[in-house]
Image: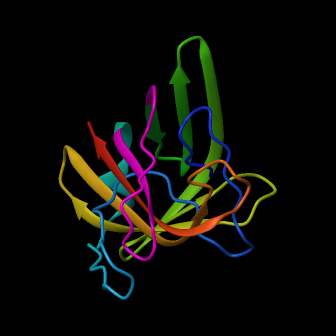
Amino acid sequence: MHLVPVGKTMKTRPGSIVATLLVLAVGACGDSVTGVDTATDDLLGTWNITSLAFTPAGGGTATEGLTGTATIAFRADLTYTLTFTEGLVQEIEDGTFSVSGSTLTLTLPGEDPDELTVTALSSTAATLYADDETFDFNDDGTETDATLTVTLQK
């Protein structure tokens, strides 16, 4: 799955985590993230992605945010649809998902699975986190180690 601000492109190194949805920001490298055990049923339904932020892994201040609107719909057949909309442009990704403990795994056809840690969860809000991302913060073609935080609301 590719969670990128609309209008930006993101390249990931092999094995990196490309996160999708709910996350608490973690500052400096080396901070530990505590996950919340999650059942598949806890995620079913359509969630608005209210925040999506890439932050330099070393705790820098540059952050890329979500532009436009985004939703993710998790279905009981273990499929999901991620939709990004900005103006008249809409991007849709369909894939499969699974949950084990606090790890949400998202898989697009033909791509390696992406794992996110569920760090907060209620019936109406969730946060996901990934700390093994890369992102080009200044559009110079150089990827920088980054964390990803995604916040969802029903």
Position of residue 64 in the picture relative to residue 34 (left or right): right
Residue at the outermost bottom position: 30
Residue at the outermost right position: 110
Q: Position of residue 43 (x, y in %)?
A: 35, 51
Disc count in the image? 0
- Magenta stretch: helix, strand or loop mostly: loop
Report the coloring of the rendering. Answer: rainbow
Q: Position of residue 18 (x, y in %)?
A: 58, 61
Residue at the outermost top position: 88
Quadrant of image for the C terminus = top left
Residue drawn 62% across the image and 52% down it: 1
- Is-magenta flag for residue 56? yes
Q: Residue 143's quadrant in the figure?
A: bottom right
Q: Residue 107's quadrant in the figure?
A: bottom right
- Is-magenta flag for residue 119? no
| 77 relative to 39, above or below | above
Q: Residue 34's quadrant in the figure?
A: bottom left
Q: Position of residue 110 (x, y in %)?
A: 81, 56
User: In front here: 90 or 28?
Assistant: 28
Residue drawn 62% across the image and 18% down it: 89
Residue drawn 33% across the image and 79% down it: 28
User: In front here: 13 or 118?
Assistant: 13
Residue drawn 23% across the image and 63% down it: 120
| 22 relative to 60, above or below | above
**Highlighted range, magenta:** 50-69
